[in-house]
Amino acid sequence: MTNTTSNKSVESDTVENAANFYNRKVLELFDSFTLNDFKRLMSGEVLVLRVKNYIKKDICKKLIENLYSKSNLFERFSFAKTLDVFKIGINFSETCINHSLLDKYFDEAGKTQRFLRELQSPYLCPIDKVRLDLDSIWKYGAVIPTMYGRRMFGGFYRSVEKGGQLPPHQNDLNEETTNKADFSPKIEFAQNVFLDFPDAGQVGEFQVWDHMPGYADAIDTLIKDNKTEQFVLEKELNDLDSKPSVIIKPEIGDLIIFRPKCIHRVNEVKAGRRVTSCFHFAYVNDNEPLRCWI
Ligand SMILES: O=C(O)CCC(=O)C(=O)O
């Protein structure tokens, strides 16, 4: 066997392993998801729940038209001023880095939620749709909770524009709250609905690693070093290639749910834009509602 042949077989083994790993770890569904599907994600058996056609493509088009019908709704994250990533509404994670945003976050939460709902009228806002679907499958429902005694913001839109990306990072509300929290997630989930996506070849894929190291000790250092869009330890980044992961190229209308404590990223968008609606939610215990916030 020549070197070339053996290289080829190593390569095809790798491709096959990646495909097998994807098939084992990504639960692909169509239209909707059930409690049993969600439980497979909760148990860690699967890494990602992907619901294709969760929202029909022609409806996504209308939702996008509505979103861009008013100018200047999108702005950069306060902690990521150099990334070409834009959003509507303040995220709780921004307040964890800049505590002075906390009052504004709570003051605007309800108003912005209502504005985003009305903006999509007569269509159902995708943020509401996911929460209502969770509410229907979970015995104790799915609610927008309070934090520090005030109601949180229930979900937002994010747009990754040409040249933008989300570098590998993690999210864990337990590690991001500074005061005593109103609830403690036992498992945190993130959901994203893809409303617009770059054309073929213009990337913007989602990658998630089967790996969830802690990072609480690093938060102060990351803030000091101005690496707040990172939120993952440097040593973990250096070692990422050795860890198993899945790469998903979402289609317009897909819903993706995963555990954001697993390191995850969005690859660079080379053209067009990648627009999602998103919130995170928590399982606290079997006898309490799921908590949904952003
Ligand atoms: O847009 C995505 O694919 C992932 C977004 C993300 O990083 C998150 O929801 O935590």
Image (cartoon, helix red, strand yellow):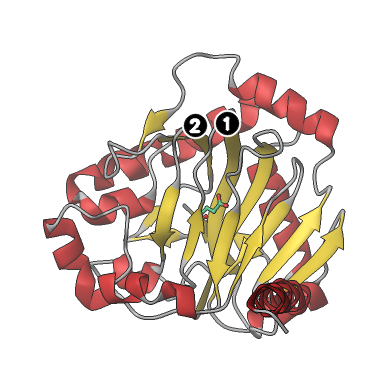
Which residue corresponds to the image point at 67% horizontal and 26% vertical from the top-left? 64
Q: Is residue 189 visible?
A: no
Residue type, mark 1 in image: Arg
Residue type, mark 2 in image: Glu
Q: Is residue 56 above or below residue 92?
A: above
- Disc 1 within 8 angstroms of ligand 1 (CB): no
Which residue corresponds to the image point at 68% horizontal and 66% vertical from the top-left? 141
Q: How many marks?
A: 2
Q: Is residue 32 above or below residue 165?
A: below
Which residue corresponds to the image point at 81% horizontal and 49% vertical from the top-left? 54
Q: Quadrant of the N terminus?
A: bottom right
Q: Is residue 61 left or right of residue 225?
A: right
Q: Where is mark 1, residue-wise? A: 273
**Regarding mark 1 in the picture, which secondary structure is present there?**
strand
Crowding at mark 1 (Cα within 10 Å: few <14, some 14-19, many 20+): many
**Regarding mark 2 in the picture, which secondary structure is present there?**
strand
For residue 168, what is the image quadrant?
bottom left
CA separation in Å, label 1 and label 2: 5 Å
Marks 1 & 2, CB-CB < 8 Å contact: yes
N-terminal-most mark, 1 or 2? 2
